[in-house]
Amino acid sequence: MQVLLRQDVRGVGRRGDIVDVSSGYARNYLVPSGLALEATAGMATQSASMKRARGARDAQDREAAQVQAATLGGAVIGISARAAQGGRLFGSVSELDIVKAIKDQKGIEIDAHKVNLGEHLKETGSHSVSIELFDDVVVAVTVEVIAQG
């Protein structure tokens, strides 16, 4: 079944794309949740206008991401957390903690889903974390986890 995507759907396509999906996926998930419309013959012009708007928005988002990358490039973000004697944390430092620390220290708001952290940080010390600000704009920051006294 062909559908016109109204929003970006991970693993399926981007806004404005006409894609083939299984009819059950379209009827049970995409259409009821407002993510897609059933494609008809006249949808090609609507798809083209959605793609043009997406292209303009992507250009602005890419520029904003590059400005943020210039600010964050090589930055050291300090986070204090409670730790035991050996440097093992009593909890962990998650993506949300990193995002909050970046906002507090650098004044930049980032979506927590953009932080590529294999698993939560569980020890004190320096950790390299990559942040994917846009499709091809990735910046590495150093997170310094400091034992809270």
Image (cartoon, rainbow, N blue to C red):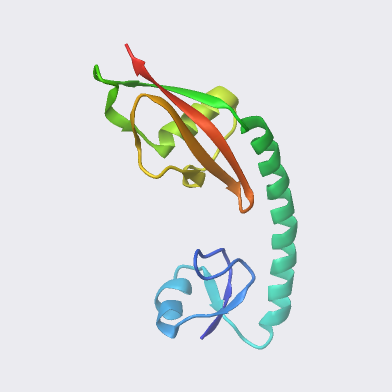
Residue 129, x across and y down, in percent:
49, 37
Residue 98, x across and y down, in percent:
46, 32
* Mark count: 0
Q: Residue furthest top?
A: 149
Vertical order, 134 against 80 (above or below):
below
Residue 51 located left or right of residue 106: right
Give the residue displayed 55% in from the left and 39% down from the top: 110
Residue placed most toward the observer, 81 or 108:
81
Residue 6 located left or right of residue 59: left
Give the residue displayed 52% in from the left and 41% down from the top: 130
Vertical order, 59 against 141 (above or below):
below
Residue placed most toward the observer, 99 or 118:
118
Residue 4, x across and y down, in percent:
59, 76
Quarter of the image that includes the C terminus: top left
Residue placed most toward the observer, 127 or 53:
127
Vertical order, 140 against 50 (above or below):
above
Give the residue displayed 29% in from the left and 21% down from the top: 87
Residue 146, x across and y down, in percent:
39, 19
Residue 44 located left or right of residue 4: right
Vertical order, 107 against 149 (above or below):
below
Give the residue displayed 66% in from the left and 88% down from the top: 41
